[in-house]
Image (spheres, grey):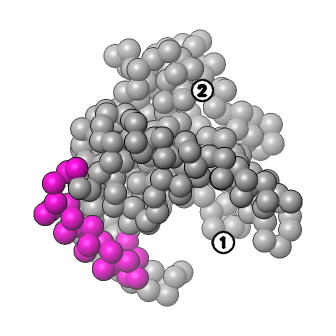
Amino acid sequence: MYEAFVTGKNLPEAYHNALIELDKHGEVTTCNAYNQLQKELSMTFVVENPISEPMVSRLIIGGFYELQQYVMEVLDGILDFKIGASENAWEYTYHDRIANYGGQLNQLQFVIDELKRSPDSRRAVIDIRDNKVDPFNSHPACLQHVQFLIRGGKLHMKVLMRSNDGVEATFMNAFAFVMLQKKVADALDLPVGSYVHRANSFHCYEKDFPLLDQFITGIKTKPIDEITYEYDGFFQDLMEEAIPNIEKVVNNLKE
């Protein structure tokens, strides 16, 4: 299985470089679970400064509304109420696994407390996989593990995914995880350091092969300002303006 390693100064650059590697070196294999082919490799991408501009790739499915909703799912748990025993209930959310692991442990608070206790700690780890649930779940958690390290006066974060859809999910995943990194950094009064995203299976499904081709063409032919947005200002304002409508939709779902 091909191992790819790419870097980028900012999140879109690293993500775009990862897509290029997937297109170039991904092996076409079967994916019987979804009855189609896939292009796949193992990917590690490193973002040197994840909060530097431009922060947002235009090569995603969705826009400011979807990105804001996903950030709120991961950081605020706006869809945690869907977890339960009913027929259409979810088995988990990332937020619930982070903030209420096993119904008793707030792993995010543990990380903050641990790094305050010992800034050079290697123990500031959040585990998402729950072996009491995931082996028996038809849709087990893709995110497995998050580690925070303070080195050189900055908060670095390293993420492990067992599986990651490079075209449909990776950028939104990574953007929300960077927001989580910033939240912890702010709680520790530290600047944000590097972000490392590891996907053991970084893939594109056959149905999205044309979309991957479209993304690669854009990366190779368009100037950077035509395939990215700066987050600070215009795009952040759009995302924040979407919050009341997102909250309204969530409240209607709860009712």
Counting the numbered discs, the total is 2
Which percent across, then down, holds residue 61? 43, 65
**Crowd rating for badge 2 (residues with CA inside 10 Å; few <14, some 14–19, many 20+):** many
Residue 142 visible in the picture: yes
Q: Residue 75 lies in what quarter of the image?
A: top right
Q: Which residues are magenta?
A: 204-225
Q: Which mark is residue 111?
A: 2
Place of residue 254 in the rendered image (x, y in percent of width and height, measured from the top left): 82, 57
Q: What type is the residue that disc 2 sits on?
A: Val
- At horizontal 34% and vertical 57% (from top left) the residue drawn is 58
Q: Which of these two is toward me, 69 or 10?
A: 69
In the rendered image, which quarter contains the N terminus? bottom left
Q: CA distance from mark 1 to mark 2?
A: 30 Å
Residue type, numbered disc 1: Ser
Q: Position of residue 193 (x, y in %)?
A: 37, 27
Name the residue carrying label 1.
138
Task: Identify whether 216 is placed above or below 182.
Answer: below
Helix, strand, or loop for circle 2? Answer: helix
- Determine whether, in the image, residue 109 is placed left or right of residue 86: left
In the rendered image, residue 82 lying in the magenta stretch gets the answer no
Please tell me which residue is depicted at 32% across the width and 78% down the height of the picture: 209
20 vs 104, left or right, is left
